[in-house]
Image (cartoon, rainbow, N blue to C red):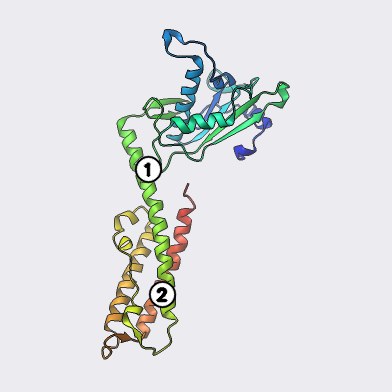
Amino acid sequence: MKDVREWDESDFDLIVEADQKETTTIDYKASPALAFKDRTPLSGGKGTLGEKHRQDMIRDVASMANAEGGLIIYGIAERSGGYPDHVDDGADPKTVSAEQIEQIILTNINPRVEGFVVRRIDLKSKGNGTCAFVVSIPKAQKNAPHQSDDKLYYRRHDATKLVMEDNEIRDMMGRSLEFGRKFGVAWDLRVETRRIVEAAKVRSNIGEGVQTPRETLVIPISPSLRSSGVAVMALPRPLRRKAAALIGSIDEYNSLVETADPGQRDKARLTKPLRDLLASVEKDGIEIGRGLVEVLKDEP
């Protein structure tokens, strides 16, 4: 499916022709659902119809983000069973805009939904200057779950939205923390491995037999990397193993630096075992860096 930023009226026609039933990730709304300024009072004195439309949008967006993400399509009337029936007459762009929809979403859902897109579709075939809208919502990740304006958490299930249970909220919050920790660790480890690789290269370039201050030969490991064992568990197993091997190689190298050339107090030469360890550190660091690049490709 092409990016919603490229959609036009023909895409609405294709949706109707495909006769795709509403799902967890697709929701059809007739254009009157965009009438946020409709002052028609609701029965029981519970606000206006426009306020209800506004509340429905907020909760629909939050519930879809808390599930798998997806599309809310305004301007397609549906028939029984949640099937698209036809592209309706659209909304008046003088009464609703993409900016207005964005503002409603941004100011009424907490934490904010990031990465959503609102696309206005001009319905030129209608001949009256009206438009429709499609809202593309990503699946909640690091900011999950999203709370609606009524302080409740909703999750979309099939073609409906349900109030989330306590255990669902706790589970999603846990996964959100895990998600944030994973990418935070990936960035920190990427920076640290770059530094370590460069340090290994610099030391490898020291000439044969050159006496060098021991403290200059040592490769320090940051406290954050050495204490990141639990956090690193969020990364794929091959990267965890390589990170552990890297730390082990550096520790072994630093230990050998302290004992090399015992006749020299403050200086030492890079022996073959030391150079072999430096080559291993450089190789492991480069491989870890490549793996982290792949992990960070999924960062939102």
Helix, strand or loop at label 2? It is: helix
Residue in the image at 48% along x and 30% along y: 61
- Circle 1: element type: helix
Residues at marks 1 and 2, CA–CA distance in whole angstroms: 36 Å
Question: Residue 228 in the image: x percent, y percent?
Answer: 31, 58
Is residue 202 placed above or below 179 in the rendered structure? below
Q: Quadrant of residue 71?
A: top right
Residue 64 visible in the current orientation = no
27 relative position to 127: left or right:
left
Residue 148, image x, y percentages: 41, 29
Residue drawn 59% across the image and 21% down it: 31
Q: Earlier in the sequence, mark 1 or mark 2?
A: 1
| Quadrant housing residue 160 | top left
| Residue indicated by mark 2 | 200
The amino acid on which the numbered mark 2 sits, given as a three-letter code, is Ala
User: Along the line of sight, which residue is nearer the eye, 201 or 170?
Assistant: 201
| Residue that mark 1 sits on | 176
Crowding around mark 1 (Cα neighbors within 10 Å: few <14, some 14 to 19, many 20+) is some
Which residue of the protein is positioned furthest toward the top in this rendering?
Answer: 44
